[in-house]
Amino acid sequence: MFKIVSKQKLAPKEFDFWVEAPRIAAHAKAGQFVVLRVDDNGERIPLTIADYDKDKGLIRLIFQVVGKTTAAMSTLSAGDCLRDISGPLGTPSEIENYGTVMMVGGGVGIAALYPIIKALKGAGNKVVTILGGRTSSLVIMKDECRKYSDELIVTTDDGSEGMRGVVTEAMKMVVERGDKVDRCWCIGPSIMMKFGTKAAKELGLPIWVSLNPLMVDGTGMCGCCRVTVDGKIFFACVDGPEFDGHKVNWDEFMSRLRQYKDEEKISMEKFEA
Ligand code: FES
């Protein structure tokens, strides 16, 4: 059992847990994730390790309520326990001093971007971070990302904070004003990563994305998380979750994400009944 030591609500459907998991915290690196079950009968879901404290033996899990399991998880409080957590899983981010990095995030993907921002800043990069959302209150972790960024640009669809518009417009603005960007990361909803990749292509930038397919074991055995990259099949849980965005087959990836929508809806309706 893994005890939740704190719980915070970051946005209407986004929650932030610090959880006791000393062995995972001891080995965690930026870009990795865990697979957890909320209770004995629960499904296994992957969540990015948003942060970790090796000294206190804690990991931070930030999640959005998107279905039955995350809805059940959101009802837990500090002092409650998660049934089991496996990790750290996945290949860590490639952290080097690239020069200038552009870090683009949206939705709960910002939680996955944050540890990479921290690690890249620690490696000596100039970090330009762009965070976007429909409205100001949905753009999470701004202060934390700002702490490790040389510049933080916020975009909102409704203009309630920062630039009115979407993250791809801010990406173009940074390049057009003359910044030489050496590498980008873009993590967020699949549609944002697809269009972030398209913008990076037009701007001639290398871009890394973090794919979040359905997962079961998280160790390369079930094949549930397969994705096509550069015409070849990879398992996101062991070969990723980060891939070269320019090589991802986005249409296939997004269609596989929708594969169990009907079953997910039924499961959520039963949970709410
Ligand atoms: Fe089973 Fe990746 S989750 S192979």
Image: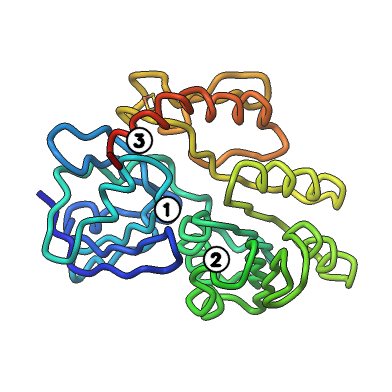
Find residue 88 and report its horizontal and vertical position in percent: 30, 46
Rendered view: 241 above or below 75:
above
Q: Are marks 1 and 3 in contact (CB under 8 Å)?
A: no
Ligand 1 located in image quadrant? top left
Q: Which residue is mark 2?
A: 138
Rendered view: 100 above or below 27:
below
Q: Residues within 10 Å of mark 1 (few under 14, many from 20)?
A: many
Q: Which residue is mark 1?
A: 64
Element under label 1? strand
Residue drawn 44% across and 64% down? 12
- What type is the residue that disc 3 sits on? Glu
Q: Would you say the beta carbon of the disc 2 residue lies within 8 angstroms of ligand 1?
A: no
- Res 269 label: 3
Q: Is residue 30 left or right of residue 87?
A: right
**Real-space Cα separation, disc 3 to disc 2, in angstroms:** 25 Å
- Res 232 label: none
Residue 56, by quadrant, is bottom left
Q: Residues within 10 Å of mark 2 (few under 14, many from 20)?
A: some
